Amino acid sequence: MAEFPKEFVWGAATAAYQIEGGATEGGKGLSIWDVFSHTPGCTYRGETGDVACDSYHRWKEDLALLQSMHLKAYRFSVAWTRIAPNGGTDWNEEGFAYYDTLVDALLEAGIEPYVTLYHWDLPQALEEKGGWRSEETARAFASYAAKMAEHFKGRVHQWFTFNEPACIVKMGYGTGEHAPGLKLPLEGQFTCWRNVIYAHCLAAQELRHADPENKVGFVSTGRICYPVSEAKTDVDAARVLTFACPDDDWAFTHTMALDPVCLGRWPEPDICGPRLAASIAAVPQYINDALPLGKPDMVGLNIYNAAPAQMGENGPSYVERPAGYAHTAMNWPVEPECLNWGPRQMQERYGLPMFITENGLSCTDKVYRDGKVHDADRIDFLARYLEKLSEGIHAGADVRGYFQWSLLDNFEWHSGYRERFGLVYVDYATGQRIPKDSAFWYGEVAAANGQSI
Ligand code: GCO
């Protein structure tokens, strides 16, 4: 049985471009994802977020689903281009009106909004001026954050500035798999990275200035390695591999996001590759001086899996998984220990309250002949992961809550609608929502604070 702290927060998560649709409605401007998804060859079958789950019109149904699952928290993101269509001070009243309605309805229902200000959908107008390659984008983001904090003062207190710099930079400006689809060398990617971190620090200052009651968060994803035994040597080896930042794999690390944000300094050179270390050494001093402003009240961890590790003959080494190991529809390994060891390692290094801001899996979900969606894989996965999260909390990780990814099946970026991550099935032709078996199961878990697992 899994036990969770008394005030543990149970929620679900989504993101604007993945669920809203209404891509050109309500005065919304174009984001880089509107442009990228309409660029031939960039997404699975050329699928776009033009309609997605149509939550822009169907948000009441989403709210009802949250209530049906006894959830007291909803993590969603705001489309910057609804608030400022061109990413400047071109404030759009219709954009504010949409999120006013959603936030007020959540509060009325006793569901706390956890708002992500940036979940990858940069205004296209800013990308055309350099995007994250330019510090001006950091300043524009701070202005957007200040406006949001002012507008929602007294109603929204839980803010996450960014979701996953790892994906924003590596996939958007490195591999080109995500918007804006650029392929820069390490040095160019790092420039984008440090501008995102700078943007967070400036925005954190604005959010706190607007309302001292505001809690500022930052959402990170990256490599987690767990020890194959409790032997100190294996535990140490796993920790070293979790936080290492080699030149060929530095972006998908919590280190590169959380060291500057939480510790106010960049990772030490001896855990960085030489090109990365040289880029860090060249960071302008005024950005380094701003880092302490970004210390968060809460760290968001998006954790889906991990790699087994041990202390080998030649030092820390990965352990090969057995043949036929369990994996998800998206071919991600099923590794529940990630929610035990990941939070414990982050607790040791950063010592800040944490939320699991995303965890879940895609399954080959379908509507069965009985009209229901039976997703035993998701129930088993969540049970195993939440048991391990409970273990990590009992070992000392200060995890305050868990947001399941995702409330709804939705637009999975360059994979389009092929992957179904939702607790709720979405028929994209009609917009119909069908709670999967896991939605009922997760609702019982939330109502029982995990005791039903
Ligand atoms: C991420 C993003 C989500 C994804 C989810 C499944 O973590 O990549 O925050 O938008 O849809 O994680 O890949």
Image (cartoon, rainbow, N blue to C red):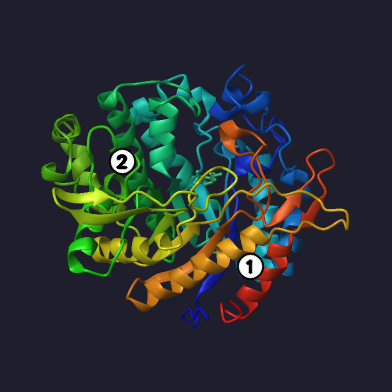
Q: Residue furthest left?
A: 270
Q: Which label sits on residue 111? A: 1
The x, y position of residue 230, in whole percent, is 27, 70
Total numbered labels? 2
Instruction: Classify 326 as above or below 132.
Output: below
Name the quadrant containing residue 69. bottom right
Q: Is residue 429 visible?
A: yes
Instruction: Classify 233 as above or below 282.
Output: below
Tell me, yes or no, whether the two marked residues, 1 and 2, touch with CB atoms within 8 Å: no
Callout 2: 10 Å neighbours few (<14), some, many (20+)? many
Q: Which residue is mark 2?
A: 198
Q: Nearer the viewer, residue 175 or 91?
A: 175
Q: Nearer the viewer, residue 306 or 449?
A: 306
Q: Residue furthest front?
A: 323
Instruction: Classify 182 as above or below 286.
Output: above
Marked residue nearer the N-terminal end (1 or 2): 1
Query: Residue type at mark 1?
Result: Ile
Instruction: Classify 305 as above or below 286.
Output: below
Q: Is residue 329 left or right of residue 119?
A: right
Q: Nearer the viewer, residue 92 or 21?
A: 21
Q: Which label sits on residue 216? A: none
Name the quadrant containing residue 239. bottom left
Q: Is residue 31 visible?
A: no
